[in-house]
Amino acid sequence: MKFRTILMAGAMTAIAGAATAECAFENEVELRSLTAGFEAWKAVTDAMAECGNFTANLDQEFREKQPEAFAADPSLYHIGGVANATLIPLLNAGTIRPLNDLVEKYGQHLKPNQLITVDGDIMAIAMMVNNQHLMYREDILEQLDLEVPTTYDEMLEAAAVIAEADVVQYPLGGTFKAGWNLGEEFVNMFLAHGGNFVDDANMPTINNEMGLAALEKLKATTEYLDPEYLASDSTYVQQQFQQGQIAMANLWASRAGAMDDPEESQVVGKVKMAAAPMGPAAPVSSIWWDGIVIASNITDEEAEAAFRVAMEGIDTETVEAHPTAAIWLIDGYEPGALAAGAAATAAKGARPYPASSAMGIMHTVLGNGIAAYLNGEKDAETTLADIEAAYMTSAQEAGLIE
Amino acid sequence: MKPRVFAAFVGPSILMMLLFIAFPLLSVFWNSFNVTQPVYETVEVESCTAGFLEQTCTTEMKTRPILDEAGEIVRQTEFVGLQTYRNVLELDRLGEALTSGSWAAIQNIDFWKALRFTIMFTLVTLPLVVGFGLGIAMLINNASKLIRGPVIFVSLLPFIITPVIGALSINWLFRGDGILTAFLEWWLARDLALFAQAWTIELLMMVYRVWHVAPFAAIIFYAGLQTVNQDSIESAVIDGASRWQRLRLIIIPHLMPLIIFVAMIHLMDSYRVFEEVVGFRAEGYVISLQWLTYDFLKPDQAGNRSISRASASAMLTMIGIAILLVPLLKRTWRDHKGTR
């Protein structure tokens, strides 16, 4: 019996081995990557592994390891997966290399909007974008004769009607978990009001009318959320949708695919995508990208092999095999129904996430500070003043301001 | 034992203690008085980012660290005295809050909010752990030989579970429509949200901690119960002492050194309460001193971390534990001198 299992396993490996033929070249150099662990990265690193001699590390805590691992000489990883915010520490420390030569040699097929450049140097290759947009239960809105909301206020009005009709447990879902998630909700709302977080001298610019308005909108939203909203992250909201507990949410585009996953979802085909609701100045959303970087502290041969393997990972084949894993930027991607919301949000002028060293601090103090306002411990003015003070202390300690 | 043999035996562990305890402690102490930061320059940079359909390029002022010839970030270290401690303690704000006499204002300052919860958590769970521990120990002791093994095993189970896993399990049992919340809702016939206000979260945290640590106390006390002088118990029974009198006058005094030991261990552990905050996702309502240290130390997505404030906060935690231990240590010292 046991012997049979081993034979079976051997046969499976042989089949998997046959699949390596899909890579355009045989990789001879030992390569390692460190990326986040969500579905799109799994698809991409699986495709990279087909070239051989490649080990992928998929780790949701990658951002805590990456700066140190890439600063080592030689670098512990050759290929890194980053987003616009997590690119900053690597860029600051100079531990990733410009890719201009490699793009010229092996990356002619890349589209211009995949090239992340800083002063003319290509520092990263983007593979996908992500933003928040409206997901809603079509059946519930139709049953109550509601239009699909286009502004945030309309969304709150619709939520009030849904609450009144009592057709679902909670009208809205939101990623309000204290910390990074809650910070991101404020970031989206503040961007939608036209705000900027810091000025050129890294001084905070959130304690103003726009900040107050954004806070009030968030508080108005919490009325329609699960009362345990301060612990609800993206996965929790996704599950609330899948289990039919909520009717609408302004949620990450990368979560859209899960709504129609028959293994997890009880609402397959009922959740539709639309643009993120508009705030006074822009949609309540921020555009993020994910992509790859190549370490500086490795030999040029390794860098060349790493870049070629990475290009195999983010090629058209991967996109065709995993069309719903992400909003791909890669050639050959045809946006389906699930991507409609993300595209419409971008078309309406959603602003990119303003990643910088100062913004890293701002995001943290916002995420820590807003909960006290939402649960009624502080008023809005005190909250913003306290967040501003916390930012000043942290930024001084980090050396960003005098 | 010859001094040389003694040194050979003790040497390695002293070396390890220096390396893994004394040196990190010194470095934390040093970091709490110094601030190390990169030297920044502000430059105009044209950067292009991934737009949806087209690239968006902007030219703006960016702050970035200066790199030296070797490609390393240039850092400067500055002695700041007690400034970091002031940043953590926010004494001026505490002063304002005290003069206005507003408890809410004090609780708006992170450190004091965390301290309030940490002390309450420690002092409330302490007697419960000792009490339940003693209860379980007596139960095991009185169980018949036949079932004693299984009883010990079952009562030790909570202590075997990794704290974070235990906290997560409680979280899943009670969060949203978790099994136990659903049961409570059915039983009380009302809607409950146990993680939507601070006091229920604090209550759950304490219940969890007592459930988790009482078995440890129990096993120590059970060992102590084996050495109770049976003659004294018998003569007490003959004198007509009740069960309660025997417990109060013979067993507890006999176990006192162990009770102090358990209390000290528990004070040290629960003052560093952390798993419950993370496992229960309670950061929005309840924070502890250890969580505060962790939050300072954790790098944000742009790679900034507050090492100095984390160090100061860790030093303050150590001082806090030392203060809490003083009464117990004094008692032990007195007993020690008495027996000599």
Image: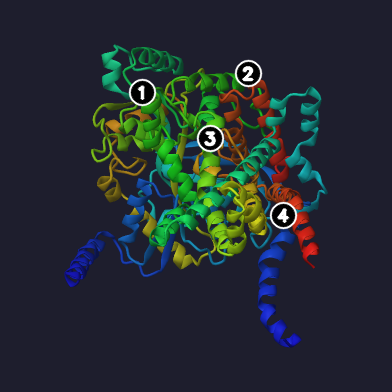
> Which chain does the residue under circle 3 lie in?
B
Instruction: Return the residue at label 1.
Output: A169
Q: Is residue B175 visible in this depiction of the protein?
A: yes
Name the residue rendered at 74%, 24% in the picture.
B102
Quick check: marks 1 and 2 in contact, CB under 8 Å?
no
Q: Please name which of the two marks, 1 or 4, marks the residue nearer to the observer.
A: 1
Mark 3 secondary-structure assignment:
helix
In space, the residues marked 2 and 4 are separated at their CA atoms by: 37 Å
Work out whether residue A317 or residue A1 is closer to the camera in this orientation and state it: A1
Quick check: marks 2 and 4 in contact, CB under 8 Å?
no
In space, the residues marked 1 and 4 are separated at their CA atoms by: 53 Å
Q: Quadrant of the N terminus of chain A?
A: bottom left
In space, the residues marked 1 and 2 are separated at their CA atoms by: 34 Å
Q: Are marks 3 and 2 on the same chain?
A: no
Counting residues from the N terminus, which is met first, the one under dot 4 or under dot 3? 4
Residue A6 picture location, percent across and down: 21, 70
Q: Is residue A120 visible in this depiction of the protein?
A: no
Instruction: Return the residue at label 2.
Output: A209
B142 left or right, relative to A206: left
Residue B86 picture location, percent across and down: 78, 41
Mark 2 secondary-structure assignment:
helix
In space, the residues marked 3 and 2 are separated at their CA atoms by: 34 Å
The three-letter code of the residue at mark 2 reads Glu
The three-letter code of the residue at mark 4 reads Arg
Instruction: Return the residue at label 4.
Output: B75
Work out whether residue B257 or residue A199 is closer to the camera in this orientation and state it: B257
Q: Is residue A54 above or below residue A187?
A: below
